[in-house]
Image (spheres, helix red, strand yellow):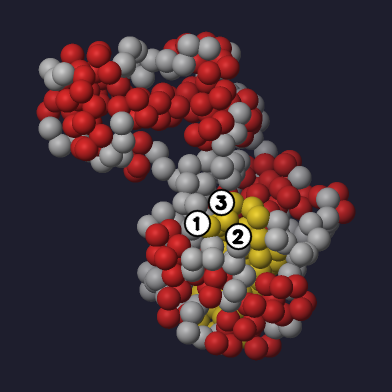
Amino acid sequence: MDDIAEPQQAEDIQPSEVTCVIFDGHQSLDLTGPFEVFRHAGYACAVVAAQAGPVRSSMGLSINADRPVAEVDPHGVDTVIVAGGEGVFDARSDRALLDWLAVAGASARRVASVCSGAFLLAEAGLLDGRRVTTHWRRGARLAQEYPAITVDCEPIFIRNGRLWTSAGVTAGIDLALALVEDDLGAEAALDVARELVMFLRRPGGQSQFSVPLWSRPPATDALHEVVDAIHTDPGGRHDITSMAAVAGLSPRHLQRRFTREIGLPPAAYVERVRIEAAQRALAERDDPVEAIARRCGFGTAETLRRTFHRLVGVAPSDYRARFHSAHVWPAAGAAIPDP
């Protein structure tokens, strides 16, 4: 689907210019988050808009656009990244901006969007036939208005050849770190993450949703007790018979009520809670994966690995390598270098 050659290997690439596209009503963090990452990594960054000068964000903060797109050669850009925000829907009627994006998107080494910036790329015809992501609140609308696109709002970002799309707001930082890593390697991305006092980027396949986001709160006391028991001891016995006993319901009745109130079946809910418990253990402890698997209710390391890869998108060992505090913070008592 991608007729442009794949990006060069990281060792062949030096930081170059990133062109950030904004519009009236953009989400400021969609711009400033990636902008900070790229600048700390040594890239030159340009901010462009329909007109040069102050461009008002959705929160009222004005950001200065260096140049209007009319003065930027669309054939001369290396990486284009488009911010999202409430103003994106009005920006889709700006024919000059869309025409510039269409040409730049066809020739740039990489094209990316943050959050609802995907709507601008879609309107410019750059997403047809692609699997993309956006903020979970916007996914249904993106899929409905652009049926030639495959929208997947589970991952925090998706790479499709030289096209990258991300979920909302802070996911733009993960996207930018991934772009830096793609160019300069994992160590360069880690250095930027340390400088910004944050964890190294979340892997793109990681879900946008944690338990409080993807599930509905229980509506009845009986289901509250079941949910509390699961969260209190994720590794405990939570088969349908045990959960039904906690709720004082028959297994069949519990299955129906749980699915109706929470939004997914009991077994799937338990699995998600156990995965999040395993994520915390991998990030915070040095226990072997086998021990974490037993404690979190998976029984064996292999079962944890299969489930983890299916729901999180990476292996437990890769997740630990990215998130364990020892990979970000100096050891206790170690000297902290001056910035």
Q: Tag 1 or tag 3, which sits nearer the N-term?
A: 1
Q: Position of residue 136 (x, y in %)?
A: 41, 54
Which residue in the structure is indicated by mark 1? 151
Q: Nearer the viewer, residue 224 or 257?
A: 257
Q: Nearer the viewer, mark 2 or mark 3?
A: 2
Mark sitting on residue 130: 2
- Decide: marks 2, 3 in contact (CB < 8 A)? no
- The image position of residue 305, as x and y in percent, is 57, 23
The residue lying toward the viewer, choosing from 309 and 184, is 309
**Residue under the point 59% across and 52% down:** 158
Q: Specify the amino acid type for callout 1.
A: Val
The residue under label 3 is which amino acid type?
A: Phe
Whole-angstrom CA distance, mark 3 to mark 1, is 11 Å
Q: Residues within 10 Å of mark 1 (few under 14, many from 20)?
A: many
Tell me the number on the disc at residue 157. 3
Q: In which quadrant of the rendered view does residue 109 lie?
A: bottom right
- Dot 3: what SS? strand
Instruction: Report the front residue among 177 and 326.
Output: 177
Amino acid identity at mark 2: Arg
